[in-house]
């Protein structure tokens, strides 16, 4: 079984589209039981994919950021995330989830009437996500179907056929009740603002080792400095500079766990002006020093 942790650095392209293959061309479905708390930074960072995603919280509380919205899901709740929606998962303590990711054409051929009538209206709508509340009858039915899908992945020799059967049952309920015209969420699929955000984020990924300024980050997407600040704040609720520091720290953490380079060298290679400043920021982020982090990863 492929781990959900394939989402870590290096698994997105220059638009933050995930490059991980969920299943394969013959069976585009994948199942990920994971504890978000076990990830670096206790999060699965910003990404999007063309596939559809459903998750259920089995233990603890998961924080799901979808565009501008921050959704707190406690045990028993679930979430549907539509195709091509930028999202991130976080946890403040143990948060065990069951997650399935699958291509829309798992349910029907893209050239078929079934796809045109029942799949495309959802995937091409502005409905970015749907919370699944166990206290709402139709949403609880979807959660029960998801539970059946999770069980199949561990025990059933005919899981592929039965998984598709359950997926279709769940989709029938979801697509019937989903409000495709709802404006409850300000999140829309790959619009101009999200595209600008992704361009600036990727510029940071490509140039984090350099001395970057807010003006340079903004220029990458042909916006003003105030426009860059507003785009980051409305998109992922941090400033461009804060995101730059977070990304540098992430790259530093990777070097600490995969190389024996001195801390001072890693600080320099990840764009920090001094080892002292790097160590302070690293401890703020990881709650431990770089050397402690390295020892824990051995």
Image (cartoon, rainbow, N blue to C red):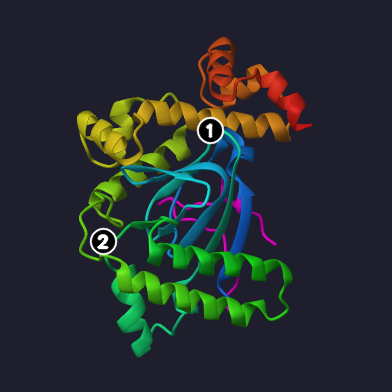
Instruction: Judge by depth and name the residue closer to the eye, 136 or 290.
Output: 136
Check the image and name the residue furthest to the bottom.
Answer: 113
Quadrant the C terminus occupies: top right
Label 2: state its secondary structure.
Answer: loop
Instruction: Judge by depth and name the residue closer to the eye, 148 or 127.
Output: 148
Check the image and name the residue furthest to the top.
Answer: 276
Instruction: Give me the residue at 53% from left, 37% from top.
Output: 91
* Residue 239 place in picture, x, y as percent: 34, 29
The disc, 2 or 1, on the residue closer to the chain's N-terminal end is 1
* Residue 78 place in picture, x, y as percent: 47, 55
Q: How many marks?
A: 2
Image vertical order of residue 231 relative to residue 83, above or below: above
Determine if the magenta segment contains residue 64: no
129 relative position to 60: left or right: left
Q: Quadrant of residue 121?
A: bottom left
Q: Which residue was labeled with disc 2?
A: 126
* Residue 117 place in picture, x, y as percent: 31, 83
Q: Is residue 260 visible?
A: no
- Crowd tier of the residue under label 2, counting other residues whose Cα lies within 10 Å: few below 14, some 14–19, many 20 or above: many
Q: Which residue was labeled with disc 1?
A: 92
Label 1: state its secondary structure.
Answer: loop
Image vertical order of residue 256 relative to residue 2, above or below: above
Image vertical order of residue 296 relative to residue 138, above or below: above
| Residue numbers of the magenta segment | 1-26
Q: Quadrant of residue 182?
A: bottom left
Q: Is residue 36 visible?
A: yes
157 relative position to 166: left or right: right
- Which SS type dominates the magenta stretch? loop
- Crowd tier of the residue under label 1, counting other residues whose Cα lies within 10 Å: few below 14, some 14–19, many 20 or above: some
Residue 215 — which label?
none
Q: Quadrant of residue 264?
A: top right
Instruction: Give me the residue at 62% from left, 30% from top.
Output: 253
């Amino acid at each position: 079984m492929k781990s959900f942790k394939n989402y870590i650095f290096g698994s997105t392209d220059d638009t933050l589209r995930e490059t991980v293959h969920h299943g394969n061309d013959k069976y585009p479905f994948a199942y990920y039981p994971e504890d978000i708390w076990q990830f670096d930074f206790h999060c699965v960072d910003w990404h999007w994919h063309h596939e559809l995603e459903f998750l259920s919280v089995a233990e603890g509380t998961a924080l799901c950021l979808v565009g501008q919205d921050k959704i707190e899901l406690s045990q028993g709740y679930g979430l549907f995330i539509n195709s091509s929606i930028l999202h991130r998962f976080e946890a403040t303590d143990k948060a065990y989830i069951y997650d399935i990711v699958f291509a829309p054409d798992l349910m029907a051929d893209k050239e078929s009437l079934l796809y045109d009538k029942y799949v495309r209206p959802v995937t091409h709508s502005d409905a970015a996500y749907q919370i699944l509340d166990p206290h709402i009858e139709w949403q609880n039915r979807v959660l029960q179907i998801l539970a059946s899908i999770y069980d199949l992945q561990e025990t059933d020799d005919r899981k592929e056929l039965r998984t598709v059967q359950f997926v279709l049952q769940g989709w029938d309920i979801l697509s019937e009740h989903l409000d495709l015209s709802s404006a409850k969420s300000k999140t829309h699929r790959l619009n101009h603002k999200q595209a600008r955000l992704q361009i600036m984020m990727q510029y940071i990924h490509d140039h984090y080792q350099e001395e970057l300024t807010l003006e340079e980050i903004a220029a990458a997407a042909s916006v003003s400095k105030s426009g860059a600040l507003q785009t980051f704040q409305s998109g992922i609720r941090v400033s461009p500079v804060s995101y730059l520091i977070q990304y540098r720290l992430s790259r530093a953490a990777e070097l600490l766990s995969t190389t024996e380079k001195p801390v001072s060298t890693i600080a320099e290679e990840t764009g920090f002006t001094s080892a002292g400043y790097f160590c302070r920021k690293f401890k703020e982020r990881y709650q431990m020093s770089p050397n402690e982090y390295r020892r824990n990863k051995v």
